[in-house]
Image (cartoon, grey):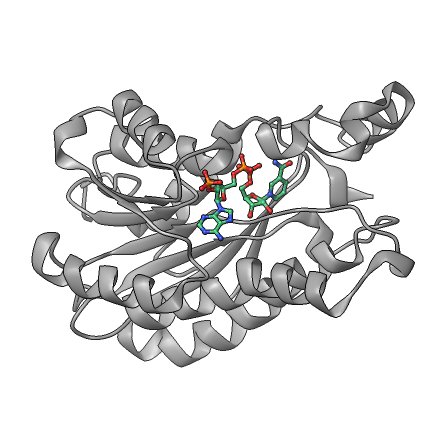
C-alpha cells in the first residue's frame, strides 16, 4: 500500500487559462496552495499580477499575456515554455465567454466568436501542450471548464450551450486518443458561480430572474473555490482512473 497523499499536486507544473479572473483565478491560487507551480494565461497583465499576488510562493509562478484566439502567439508561448518552465503535467482551461442571445439575434459572426474562444482555443492549446516535447512523459491531466449549459438548456443560451456541449463531447474522443500516453481529459461543468462573468449575466440585473436561477441550485449558488477544488482533484493522481467524463459541480442543478 502506497501511503503518499494521492490528492496532492505537489511538484506538478500546471497551466491555468483565464487566470486573471473568477474561476481561473481561484484555480491558479488553489493549485499553488496544493503545491503546484503554475503558468498563468490571461489577457490583462495587471489582473494576472493580482492573481499571482494571492498565490503562495508567488515568485515561482509564470505569467503570460495572450489572447487564446491568437493561435500563432499561443504556439510561440508554448515553445517558450519548453525552455522556461519544463514539462507540463496539466491544464485547467477556464478561459471562456458567455452570452444570453435569442435565436433571432444569432449571427455567423457571433457563432464564430464563441466557437473560437470557447472551443477552438481549447483544442489548439491542448494540441500544443500535449506534444511529447511539452507534456511530462509520465502523462498528465487536461480539465476543460464546461457548464451545466452543455448538458441542459435555457432560453437564450443556444450559442453558449453549443460551445460547452462541444467541450464535453470532444473531451471523450480526446480521452480515448490520449489514454495510451496516460493523458486524462475531463470536463468540470459548473452551475452558476458568483464571478465577474455571472455578475454581468441577464439574471443578475433582474431580481425575479435571480430568484429563479437560485431556485435551480438546491445547495445555493456556487463559489469559484467549489470549481477549483474539483479541478485540482482531477489534476491529482487521486483521479488517475478518471478520463472522458464530466464532473457536474452545480449545487444540484442537474439532479432534477
Ligand atoms: N461563472 C459562472 O457562473 C460559470 C458557470 C459555468 C461555467 N463557467 C465557465 O467558467 C469559465 C470561467 O468563467 P468565469 O465566471 O470565471 O468568467 P470571468 O470571470 O469572466 O473570467 C473569464 C476568463 O477568461 C479569459 N478569457 C476570455 N476570453 C479570452 C481570450 N480570448 N483569450 C484569453 N483569455 C480569455 C478572461 O481573460 P481576461 O482577463 O483577459 O478578460 C478571464 O480570465 C468560463 O469558461 C465559463 O464559461 C462559468
Provide residue 142's location: percent of width, then percent of height.
39, 59
Residue located 12% across and 52% down the image? 85
**Relative to 99, does residue 142 appear above or below in the rendering?**
below
**Relative to 198, does residue 65 appear above or below in the rendering?**
below
Q: Within the image, what quadrant is residue 178 found in?
A: bottom left
Q: Quadrant of the C terminus?
A: top right
Q: Of residues 175 and 100, which is closer to you in this image?
A: 100
Q: Within the image, what quadrant is residue 18 found in?
A: top left
Q: Of residues 31 and 61, which is closer to you in this image?
A: 61
Q: Is residue 210 visible?
A: yes
Provide residue 24's location: percent of width, then percent of height.
44, 38
Provide residue 88's location: percent of width, then percent of height.
21, 57
Q: On the picture, is 97 further left or further right than 173?
A: right
Q: Of residues 216 and 41, which is closer to you in this image?
A: 41
Q: Within the image, what quadrant is residue 190 found in?
A: top right
Provide residue 203's location: percent of width, then percent of height.
81, 30
Amino acid at each position: 500500500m502506497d501511503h503518499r497523499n494521492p490528492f496532492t499536486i505537489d511538484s506538478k507544473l500546471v497551466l491555468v487559462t483565464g487566470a486573471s479572473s473568477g474561476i481561473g483565478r481561484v484555480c491558479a491560487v488553489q493549485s499553488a496552495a496544493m503545491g503546484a507551480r503554475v503558468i498563468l494565461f490571461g489577457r490583462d497583465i495587471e489582473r494576472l499580477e493580482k492573481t499571482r499576488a494571492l498565490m503562495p510562493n508567488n515568485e515561482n509562478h509564470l505569467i503570460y499575456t495572450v489572447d487564446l484566439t491568437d493561435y500563432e502567439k499561443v504556439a510561440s508561448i508554448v515553445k517558450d515554455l519548453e525552455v522556461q518552465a519544463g514539462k507540463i503535467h496539466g491544464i485547467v482551461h477556464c478561459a471562456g465567454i458567455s452570452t444570453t442571445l435569442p435565436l433571432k439575434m444569432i449571427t455567423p459572426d457571433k457563432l464564430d466568436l464563441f466557437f473560437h474562444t470557447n472551443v477552438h482555443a481549447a483544442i489548439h492549446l491542448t494540441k500544443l501542450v500535449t506534444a511529447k516535447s511539452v507534456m511530462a512523459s509520465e502523462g498528465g491531466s487536461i480539465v476543460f471548464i464546461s457548464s451545466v449549459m452543455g448538458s441542459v438548456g435555457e432560453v437564450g443560451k443556444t450559442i453558449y450551450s453549443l460551445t460547452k456541449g462541444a467541450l464535453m463531447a470532444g473531451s471523450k474522443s480526446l480521452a480515448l486518443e490520449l489514454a495510451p500516453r496516460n493523458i486524462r481529459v475531463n470536463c468540470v461543468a459548473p452551475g452558476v458561480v458568483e464571478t465577474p462573468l455571472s455578475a454581468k449575466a441577464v439574471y443578475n440585473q433582474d431580481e425575479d430572474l435571480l430568484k429563479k436561477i437560485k431556485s435551480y441550485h438546491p445547495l445555493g449558488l456556487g463559489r469559484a473555490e467549489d470549481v477549483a477544488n474539483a479541478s485540482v482533484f482531477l489534476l491529482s493522481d487521486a483521479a488517475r482512473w478518471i478520463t472522458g467524463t464530466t464532473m457536474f459541480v452545480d449545487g444540484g442543478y442537474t439532479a432534477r
